Image (cartoon, rainbow, N blue to C red):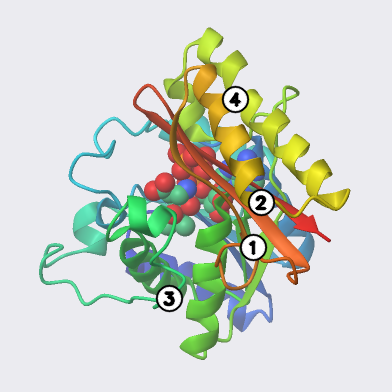
Amino acid sequence: MKVVDSISALRTTVNAWRLNGETVGFVPTMGNLHDGHLKLVKKAKAHNDRVVVSIFVNPMQFGANEDLDAYPRTIEEDKAKLISVGADAVFLPSVAEMYPAGLDAQTFVEVPGISDSHCGASRPGHFRGVATVVTKLFNMVQPDDAFFGEKDFQQLQVIRALAHDLSMAVRIHGVPTEREASGLAMSSRNGYLTEAEKATASAIYEEMQRVKSSIEKGNVNFTALEETMIANLEAKGFKNDYCQVVNASTFQAAREIDKELVLLVAMFMGKTRLIDNLQITR
Ligand SMILES: Nc1ncnc2c1ncn2[C@@H]1O[C@H](COP(=O)(O)OP(=O)(O)OP(=O)(O)O)[C@@H](O)[C@H]1O
Ligand SMILES: CC(C)(CO)[C@@H](O)C(=O)[O-]
Ligand code: BAL
């Protein structure tokens, strides 16, 4: 596996593959890799001749009081995991390589509408940071295909809109959420939890499944379902950020006529913010 930390070395590597007629898949990450990330890499390997993974903890998508400094950085372990699943290159840019003139001077990309609610409302500027860094990474790698987890469901929709609206040639693939045996969605931020908190956190998935099965049985009292879910989770020690059944395309509150829904959840366990979601078809 090639390890590159400059944009020019990345371009040289990818260009050589392209000259050879090989296709390129891309998996952007913030590192501290777990089986969810490796699932994306395996999908990319199945689709493409070559796979590039980026590891970059992007300061532009973190709010002032968020966990940018605490975010786990485990580069050596990450490289070993990427070799084990056959990644062809890992791109490890520095902040200076990505933002040489600093963040204040940086041109940005913003996807209107979909970026404003839920994670966008709780984390102002977050999706501007994501859309900007993903655009830059796409321009650097120029992949045929790019792979994102459904765990970050809103992020996936933001990136689909970005690629469509800016006429990018890249194909965007969503990959189902990888979970612990308990149902807890795998996440680098699970590492902030104690074992006891982790055991409690699996309640998010249990509650989501309860809501899904109730809706599938015909219950359309979405507000009551959300209120019960929030109360059940708060009784276990969570603090609600948002918990809402929405139209899967518009992210507006679900209505009785909607067929494709998604239950979007963000909950705090202490200082740790966990997100999850479940798609529901009526
Ligand atoms: N459990 C998972 N299953 C499938 N894909 C995942 C999972 N967790 C993360 N991903 C995807 O991996 C990519 C990189 O995500 P990222 O590095 O932020 O990991 P993360 O574990 O979600 O971290 P955090 O929860 O701290 O944001 C994103 O496309 C994300 O949706
Ligand atoms: C897509 C991404 C790598 C952009 O920094 C990040 O938001 C993530 O890890 O989901
Ligand atoms: N997985 C999304 C990246 C973030 O939380 O900043």
**Can residue 37 be seen by looking at this rendering?**
no
Residue 19 lies, in percent from the top left, at 60, 82
Q: What residue sits 49% from the left and 69% below the top?
A: 158
The mark that comes first in sequence, 1 or 2, is: 2
Q: What residue would you read off at disc 3? A: 113
**Can residue 267 be seen by looking at this rendering?**
yes
Residue 70 lies, in percent from the top left, at 29, 30
Q: What residue sits 67% from the left and 75% below the top?
A: 23
The crowd level at tag 3 (other Cα within 10 Å; few <14, some 14-19, many 20+) is few
Answer whether labels 1 and 2 touch (C-beta < 8 Å). yes
Answer whether labels 3 and 4 touch (C-beta < 8 Å). no
Q: CA distance from mark 3 to mark 2?
A: 22 Å
Q: CA distance from mark 1 to mark 2?
A: 7 Å
Which residue type carries mark 3?
Gly
- Specify the label residue 222 is tagged with: 2
- Specify the label residue 254 is tagged with: 1
The mark that comes first in sequence, 3 or 4, is: 3
The mark that comes first in sequence, 3 or 2, is: 3
